[in-house]
Amino acid sequence: EVQLVESGGGLVQPGGSLRLSCVVSGFTVSSNYIGWVRQAPGKGLEWVATIYSSGSAYYPGSLKGRFTISRDNSRNTVFLQMNSLRAEDTAVYYCATLIATGGTAEYFHHWGQGTRVTVSS
Amino acid sequence: DVQMTQSPSTLSASIGDTVTITCRASQSIGTWLAWYQQKPGKAPKLLIYKASTLESGVSSRFSGDGFGTEFILTIKSLQPDDFATYYCQSYDNNAYSFGRGTKLDIK
């Protein structure tokens, strides 16, 4: 059974940094695809980052440069480093595995329970 | 980037009804489309991928169709557990985009 457990959320001041962790079991992060999706309070889902088995990382243009996704294969864990945080980054952050049907990773499959990030002074 | 326009934003229906939710992509995405169900306080759940492939364990009352820019999620014979928010999601060139969601509530 695939399980994902996020941690690292909390309250941070504007301009601050936070690193989220996603510990994965039942799924090998180094040979698969993992992503982060966030959901602001009362809002919809927003893709944040993905890391492919090759190690390549992708971000939406709006977040590129502030957020970095990485992984530690020995701990089967994926991280999301978030810098220069703004009030609009306040959200629940989910990590999720992705499934590949056409040679790359297209859909978010198994999800964690999420970790809440609040950016406020 | 692909923009996804989902409609309606809210939908009221009764137990036993059949409903449809539409998602329109700003450019052709072939069949690179998924549908998710989300309940309050919970993570989204994958229902359908590749526009029409039912995820394992998902009820056959859910079905998806479409190609290119127009996609539909159909839910037949609504059950109490189906009342939730539904999102479409596209994939194109290593980027992912979600629709704004459709909240399905009981009439």
Image (cartoon, grey):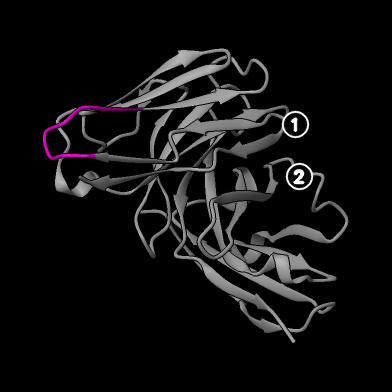
Compare residues A29 and A43 and report the one nearer the observer: A43
The chain ID associated with circle 2 is A
Determine if marks 2 and 1 fall on one subunit: no
B9 with respect to A68 (left or right) = left
Q: Residue at x 60, y 66 (%)?
A: A91
Label of residue A56 in the image: none
Q: Helix or strand or loop: what does disc 1 sit on?
A: loop
Q: Is residue B82 positioned above or below A38 on the image?
A: above
Q: Is residue B15 positioned above or below A14 on the image?
A: above
Q: Helix or strand or loop: what does disc 2 sit on?
A: loop
Helix, strand or loop: magenta stretch: loop
B26 with respect to B8 (left or right) = right
Q: Quadrant of the C terminus of chain B?
A: top left
Q: Residues within 10 Å of mark 2 (few under 14, many from 20)?
A: some
Compare residues B1 and A22 and report the one nearer the observer: B1
The amino acid type of the residue labelled 1 equals Asp
Say if mark 2 contacts mark 1, CB within 8 Å.
Answer: yes
Q: Which residues are magenta?
A: B13-20
Residue B17 belongs to the span the image colors magenta: yes
Q: Which residue is mark 1?
A: B1
Q: Which residue is mark 2?
A: A60
Residue A69's x, y, as percent?
Answer: 74, 57
